[in-house]
Image: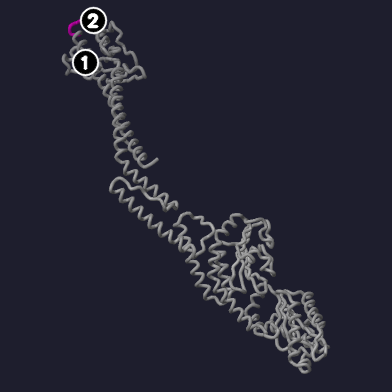
């Protein structure tokens, strides 16, 4: 229903209600007028009867009154007429020759109270009025009632009851009423039609503006309001169209220019450009804050932490794993894994060939094709893998596990903004990786390629406390090549360096991915083995000891082999102090050399009690 129809309906309803009220009042007034006319006739008839009966009494022809009364009954509209006597009159003049006793309770009531009584009887086909009027004795009447009647002033002498047919009056009132209704209806139609035509231009303009605003509210900024008819609505439409046009221009510019900047999401769920612009501006603000924050972070781990915060908190990406790929070594490591712990990819090596996202440098979506990535382990669920190259040597892969289709849909929608965050973080991550390389070189021993003593110092100071808080335990091994000084003295330092490199390679091949080897100084080395058992620690030490002994060295046409002595202790099982644990391992190493060399000795408290343990 448009505005014109609504306003017309309202006016029609109001005028109709007013007409109905008027008709009701007119009907009630006509009805009351009919009754008043009947009452006037009754009073006139009662007065005529009273005067006639008085005349009959004066002339001594009271016994002839029935003829007069009969003639009165035959009057038009008079259905019935009778008179009643009071008991005092009957006592004075004797019983009447006609039946003038009260016919019903109304007659009795009027004789008793001296008050007139009116009663209306109505039905669909008939209407009548019955009125009973008392005759009251009064000395002021002419002739004086009290001269003939033995009565007191104000005493009821009798009454007259009359019945009138008021059907004709009612019909006349109804006819008048219907005429009024007809005239009112015609007037109503005319006035409603007139008003509807007069307000239609205004309501049409209002409807046009309303419809335009509704479409703009729904996101359609191409719509324009109609020109209108009068000066006022033409101006309103013109102003509205100008505002919409400006708004469309601004929003289109934002969508066109800034969307590319923030990597518009795969599918914009907001068809409304205004809401899209709001999202884009919010994205830009968040990206700016992110970039300004990571610029001051020292380590790449801090940048990764910020990135995870954005992905999980701002973009609501859950169940996330971030891999850092070493493209030179063709291997990867996990730099972050969400608490849910659902990892769809277990690749650690041959990443460039086996990782589809890395190999194709395209986003991998599990819903594109069944088992699209053969390396993925979550075959029955959804996942998204986003590759991102940081440099020629490093890249990142974001693996997002989605347990529902809604989660997958949400993740796909966020891919564009995820890539923008990665792009903004790229130069920072690259520079921090370069700093790591420089820092790594500062931590690497030039001869063996192992970590140096400085790395051990920094590890103990910065990383060890965190790993201890996480429940990590260690086996600390101290190794020394037996009779190494003899090699340097006999064959030269080049021979000694070659032997150190062979031992380094032997240890690298023997330790696990979580363990690391440090050149402690000269021919001494330290191995930190994470979460060891008695069996695994002993097995690692024996394997290094045995494998190194198998190596043959040839210098100056002489072939020989070398052995290594190893001592180890457990941290924090044997001592809560890491440097003391290294001392305990050194004590074991000293014991091994003192008791024949080429041995593996595990720390026990008995070693401290001996002569060689007094220094500890």
Contact? badges 1 and 2 (CB < 8 Å)? no
- Residue 8 lies in quadrant: top left
Region rendered in magenta: 57-63
Mark 2 neighbour class, 10 Å CA radius: few under 14, some 14 to 19, many 20 or more: few
Q: Mark 1 points at which residue?
A: 47
Q: Main secondary structure of the magenta part?
A: helix
Determine if residue 578 is in view: yes
Q: Which of 260 and 518 lies nearest the eye of the viewer?
A: 260
What label sits on residue 514 in the rendered view? none
The picture places residue 548, in percent across and down from the top left corner, at 79, 82
- Name the element at disc 1: helix
Q: Report the residue at 19% width, 14% height from top.
A: 145
- Residue 614 lies in quadrant: bottom right
Q: Which of 572 and 63 lies nearest the eye of the viewer?
A: 572
Q: Which of 45 and 233 lies nearest the eye of the viewer?
A: 233
- Compared across the picture, whether 35 is left or right of 327 comes to left
Q: Could you tell me how many numbered marks the image carries?
A: 2
Q: Is residue 366 magenta?
A: no
Mark 1 and mark 2 lie on one chain; the one further toward the N terminus is: 1
Determine if residue 616 is in view: no
Q: Report the residue at 33% width, 18% height from top.
A: 127
What label sits on residue 64 in the rendered view? 2
């Amino acid at each position: 229903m448009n505005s014109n129809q609504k306003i017309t309906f309202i006016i029609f309803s109001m005028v109709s209600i007013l007409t109905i009220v008027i008709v009701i009042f007119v009907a009630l007034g006509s009805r009351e007028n009919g009754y008043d006319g009947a009452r006037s006739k009754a009073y006139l008839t009662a007065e005529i009867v009273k005067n006639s009966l008085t005349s009959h009494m004066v002339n001594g022809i009271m016994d002839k009154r029935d003829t007069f009364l009969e003639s009165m009954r035959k009057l038009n509209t008079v259905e019935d007429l009778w008179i009643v006597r009071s008991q005092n009159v009957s006592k004075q003049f004797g019983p009447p020759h006609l039946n003038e006793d009260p016919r019903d309770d109304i007659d009795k009531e009027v004789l008793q109270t001296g008050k007139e009584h009116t009663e209306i009887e109505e039905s669909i086909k008939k209407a009548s009025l019955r009125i009973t009027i008392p005759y009251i004795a009064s000395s002021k009447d002419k002739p004086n009632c009290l001269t003939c009647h033995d009565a007191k002033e104000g005493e009821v002498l009798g009454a007259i009851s009359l019945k009138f047919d008021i059907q004709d009056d009612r019909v006349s009132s109804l006819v008048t009423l219907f005429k009024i209704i007809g005239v009112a209806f015609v007037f109503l139609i005319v006035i409603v039609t007139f008003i509807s035509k007069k307000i239609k231009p205004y309501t049409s303009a209002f409807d046009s503006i309303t419809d335009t605003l509704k479409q703009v509210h729904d996101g359609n900024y191409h719509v324009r309001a109609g020109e209108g008819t009068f000066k006022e609505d033409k101006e309103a439409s013109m102003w509205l169209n100008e505002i919409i046009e400006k708004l469309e221009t601004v929003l289109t510019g934002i969508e066109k220019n800034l969307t590319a900047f923030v990597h518009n999401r795969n599918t914009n769920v907001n068809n409304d450009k205004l809401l899209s612009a709001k999202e884009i501006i919010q994205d830009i603000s968040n990206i700016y804050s992110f970039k300004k924050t990571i610029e001051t972070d020292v380590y790449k781990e801090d940048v990764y932490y910020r990135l995870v915060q954005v992905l999980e908190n701002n973009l609501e990406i859950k169940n996330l794993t971030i891999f850092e790929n070493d493209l030179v070594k063709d291997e990867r490591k996990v730099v972050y894994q969400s608490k849910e712990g659902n990892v769809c990819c277990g690749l650690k090596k041959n990443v460039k060939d086996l990782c589809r996202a890395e190999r194709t440098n395209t986003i991998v979506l599990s819903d594109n094709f069944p088992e699209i990535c053969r390396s993925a382990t979550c075959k029955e669920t959804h996942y998204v893998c986003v590759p991102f190259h940081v440099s020629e040597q490093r890249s990142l892969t974001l693996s997002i596990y989605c347990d529902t289709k809604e989660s997958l849909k949400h993740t796909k929608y966020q891919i564009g903004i995820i890539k923008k965050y990665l792009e903004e973080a790229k130069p920072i991550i690259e520079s921090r990786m370069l700093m790591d390389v420089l820092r790594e070189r500062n931590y690497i021993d030039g001869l063996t390629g192992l970590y140096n003593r400085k790395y051990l110092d920094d590890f103990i100071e910065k990383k060890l406390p965190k790993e201890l808080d996480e429940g990590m335990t260690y086996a600390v091994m101290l190794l020394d090549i037996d009779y190494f000084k003899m090699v340097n003295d006999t064959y030269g330092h080049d021979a000694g360096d070659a032997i150190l490199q062979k031992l380094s390679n032997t240890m690298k091949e023997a330790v696990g991915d979580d363990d690391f080897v440090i050149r402690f100084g000269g021919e001494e080395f330290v191995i930190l083995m994470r979460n060891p058992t008695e069996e695994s620690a002993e097995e690692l030490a024996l394997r290094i000891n045995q494998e190194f002994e198998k190596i043959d060295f040839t210098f100056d046409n002489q072939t020989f082999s070398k052995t290594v002595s190893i001592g180890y202790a457990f941290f924090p099982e044997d001592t809560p102090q890491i440097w003391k644990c290294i001392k305990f391992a050194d004590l074991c190493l000293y014991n091994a050399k003192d008791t024949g060399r080429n041995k593996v000795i595990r720390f026990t408290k008995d070693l401290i009690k001996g002569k060689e343990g007094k220094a500890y």
